[in-house]
Image (cartoon, rainbow, N blue to C red):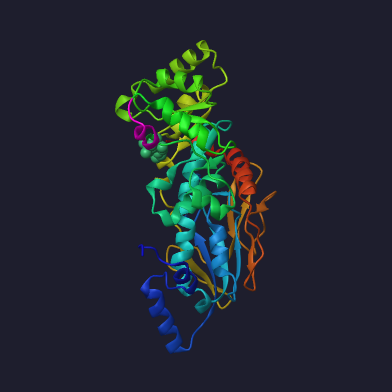
Amino acid sequence: MFDIVPESAIDEGRATDAYFLRTEEALAHAGKNPRVVVEVTADQFPTGEFELLAGVADVARLLEGRNVDADAIPEGTLFDGGPVMRIEGPYLEFARLETSILGFLSHPSGMATAALRARLAAPETSLLSFGARHVHPSIAGTVDRSALVAGFDGFSHVAAGDLMGRAASGTMPHALMICFGPGNQEDAWRAFDEAVDADVPRIALCDTYDDEVNEAIRAAELGFDSVRLDTTGSRRGDFRHIIRETRWKLDMAGHEDVDIFVSGGITPAAIDELADVVDGFGVGSYITNGDPIDFALDIVELEGEPTAKRGKLSGVKSVYRTPDGGHHVELADAEAPAEGTPLLEPLVRDGEVVAEFDIDAAAERAMAEAELVGFGESMSE
Ligand SMILES: O=P(O)(O)OC[C@H]1O[C@H](OP(=O)(O)OP(=O)(O)O)[C@H](O)[C@@H]1O
């Protein structure tokens, strides 16, 4: 019905580049199915430019039930070089899965990395992921899960929530306000308040027809807990001033408890500029525009012997984090760096998924990692 590659095609390995099917034919013809170790890597050596890993859970599900062992650094870990994942087994067990394995990691990790930049711009302020509308609906869950791995507080997409067993958050769209017509904002807000479950936060959208200050005070008078300002870019002028003026006049009217949320084109720079005058942000395109990480999957060992294509590092590797925040890449059988903690952990053993995936734990790890490696310090918009 829609242009969506079905889950069954991913699981069966048909969500692949055709040359892997040709490879299967050629290997079968030659009677070959070598035991290999492959590694998934973005940069061969540490670069100092860290990125946040996400999407590992989907890879684990894809490898489940296949005759392979796999290790991966946990979701929510920052990496800047060396393998993030290692898979070992007969090559034909997983040859055709390469395309989907890389896709499962590349896009989520890029979005999680962007989301972490936003998170670090205001560690204490509420951040909601609003990005689903910018991507194909089939991956909305990936967008919002990546944002949560990076420490976001919530997300807006209902089906993404169904996937994660969490409730979506949200306020109200301009469409609701416009359906009641100009001058009738109270009718729209009142209808929302009367109709929507009591446990849904009362956040009124206050920029549709009149001045933000005017609408915010009117919504507050109706009893709304919070207002959202999504002022159109062409009208924004000095957004910080608009927000401060709204805060000032809400306070003057006795509505010191009414929170102010903002959305629309919010970037880490905007968060940095506005965090002290707002109570929360909705962030969409900044997350979904996060560049996919350029992962590659390469054979590094063939029948127990180190090998690699030119330009790639042969041999099975380990990666370590040292207390100074260093990320070290070494041969797996070499001595670990002093005080180095190995980052690759068992993911799949004999086809059984042995890792656990906890979004909150990943988010905690991401924040600790960011502090350890100084991720925020090299942050650019
Ligand atoms: O700019 P982003 O960071 O991607 O934010 C996502 C969207 O959230 C806000 O929309 P709103 O709910 O106000 O949309 P509406 O005008 O359709 O009601 C904002 O105006 C963006 O369109």
For the residue pair 124 and 200, the one nearer the viewer reads as 200
Q: Position of residue 369 (x, y in %)?
A: 60, 43
Q: Locate the N terminus and report the quarter of the image it occupies.
A: bottom left
Q: How many marks?
A: 0
Which secondary structure class fits the magenta region best?
helix
- Left or right, residue 335 beside residue 122: right
Q: Position of residue 329 (x, y in %)?
A: 57, 55
Q: In terms of image quadrants, where is residue 214? A: top left
For the residue pair 172 and 315, the one nearer the viewer reads as 172
For the residue pair 7 and 185, the one nearer the viewer reads as 185
Magenta residues (range): 175-182
Residue 52 appears in the picture as rendered: no
Q: Residue visible at 48% across and 89% down?
A: 31
Relative vertical location of residue 150 with respect to residue 255 in this rendering, above or below: below
Q: Locate the C terminus and report the quarter of the image it occupies.
A: top left
Q: Position of residue 204 (x, y in %)?
A: 47, 29
- Left or right, residue 160 beside residue 358: left
Q: Position of residue 40 (x, y in %)?
A: 51, 62
For the residue pair 339 and 256, the one nearer the viewer reads as 256
Residue 39 appears in the picture as rendered: yes
Q: Residue visible at 42% across and 18% down?
A: 213
Relative vertical location of residue 276 with respect to residue 165 in this rendering, above or below: above
Q: Residue visible at 64% across and 52% down?
A: 358
**Residue lying at the far left of the rendered structure:** 234
**Residue lying at the far right of the rendered structure:** 339
